Image: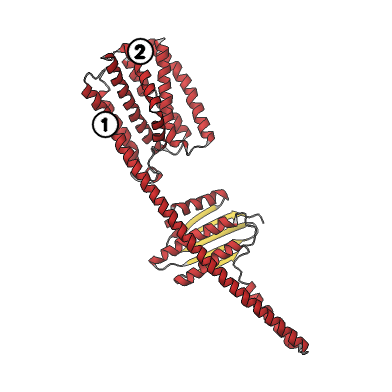
Amino acid sequence: MTVLSFAVLTTLIQIASAYLRFLPFRKKMTAEEIHKLWQYMLLWSMSALLLYLLYLSRSGVHLTSFKVMFFLGWIPYVALSVMVIRHQNAQHVFVVGMQGLWSFMLHSLSGMILAALFGAISNDVIHYQTVCYLILFLLLFPWEKKMFENLLPTDRLLDDSPLRWYVAALPIAIFLGALIPVVHITFLPEWKDRLARLALPLFFFLIYSTMSFSSREAMERMQKEHANKLMRQQRDALKRRASFMKEAAEHISVLRHDLRHSYRMIYTLLKNGVEDMALEHIRTQEEKLQTLAENPVSAMPLIDATIAIYLRQARELGIPFRNEVHLPCPVAVKESDLALLLSNLLEEAFVLQEEGGQEIRLGLHHDGQQCRLEFRERQGALEHLDENSRAFLDDFVEKYGVRMETSEEGGWHVLSLQWGSRG
């Protein structure tokens, strides 16, 4: 019975440890990935239980078998996690180290509790270690869950930083530093040694928790500042658009006045029998209309307004801004999405005007089969896009199946987007 209970308790501890290692990745996993991972975990747990029973029935329950099972039993679970949760190698290393430290602390606390209860730890009471471990795990579970859900450092630190492997390996280095001195010791007889064994991982967890909290606070402040900046930019854009709409209304009022005047003139000429002059006046008005019709911005109101707003701002800033737009509806993307994409690109290009020498060329074309956007500018706006604008560009590309290319040609930074059209 002792062999069976010890094998079951050990398996439960391994599952509990696997659950903690799963928590930091859960928010970014799909439901299918989560189901697949735990299907593999439970299948392996059943196999591991049989292996533990076979091993313990031959070796017996003692400290050596206890160490072998806990030193090696976690490896298949981690391998399954890496197999399902791909392209997160640095994150896996970091999480394994942190979970190892946490497990080391719980085992240390369990050992101290047994020492307090039994006076000395022996092979006869070693199976109580697993019971005590699971009780501590359950008592601390609410705090453990919250801590491991927010365990990982920022993605930028572990994905892009050249120091990512040093950061990822730090918890494992601390864990090995705490483990190696006691791995060959059967029992720690002195309480000062037991407390010292607990102190190093506990101190590391406290320091990391403090740094992690401070980092999250700083990140939240940056996100709030960025949100405020976006709101200011949107407010300024709305002001520019309101000004543009006011100008357009005034222009329409002038056109209506000219149209009434033109009608009266034609009526007067016809009334006086001067048909030749009336026809000449009509031809002149047709030429003016033709001139206006040859230079449309687009057949889409939001795109038209967006380009018009930034054309005006470009004139105010002295930025050369050429655009060639031939974009009838439909274009297989939401007009609002395309307008926001243009706004993000142009806004960043205008911000970089402070460095001087900025110049912008925008092309939007539709050939009946494909739509093509070509954005050219001198200062590398695409490289300076903030996280939200970059995320929107990536979402736009993924959402509409856009083929994106970036290049540099003769001092120009070029962004080309191409996607299929509905007609």
Locate residue 31, reporting x and y percent.
Answer: 53, 35
Question: In terms of depth relative to the viewer, which is nearer, 77 or 146?
Answer: 146
Q: Is residue 240 above or below residue 139?
A: below
Secondary element type, mark 2: loop
Locate residue 344, reporting x and y percent.
Answer: 49, 58
**Which color mode does the image show?**
secondary structure
Q: What's the amino acid at mark 2? A: Val
- Quarter of the C terminus within the rendering: bottom right
Q: Quadrant of residue 212?
A: top left
- Quarter of the N terminus within the rendering: top left
Query: Residue 200 bears which disc, if any?
Result: 1
Residue at horizontal 75 percent and vertical 84 percent from the top: 267
Q: Quadrant of residue 365?
A: bottom right
Q: Distance of mark 2 from mark 1, alpha carbons?
A: 29 Å
Residue 192 visible at all? yes
2 vs 1, front mark? 1
Residue at horizontal 43 percent and vertical 60 percent from the top: 380
Q: Residues within 10 Å of mark 1 (few under 14, many from 20)?
A: some
Question: In terms of depth relative to the viewer, which is nearer, 138 or 272?
Answer: 138
Residue at horizontal 77 percent and vertical 90 percent from the top: 272
Along the polypeptide, which appears first: circle 2 or circle 1? Answer: 2
Locate residue 264, reporting x and y percent.
Answer: 71, 83
Q: Is residue 159 above or below residue 200?
A: below
Q: What's the amino acid at mark 1? A: Leu
Query: Residue 392 bears which disc, if any?
Result: none
Residue designated by label 2 = 61
Q: Residues within 10 Å of mark 2 (few under 14, many from 20)?
A: many
Residue 166 visible at all? no
Locate residue 64, reporting x and y percent.
Answer: 32, 16
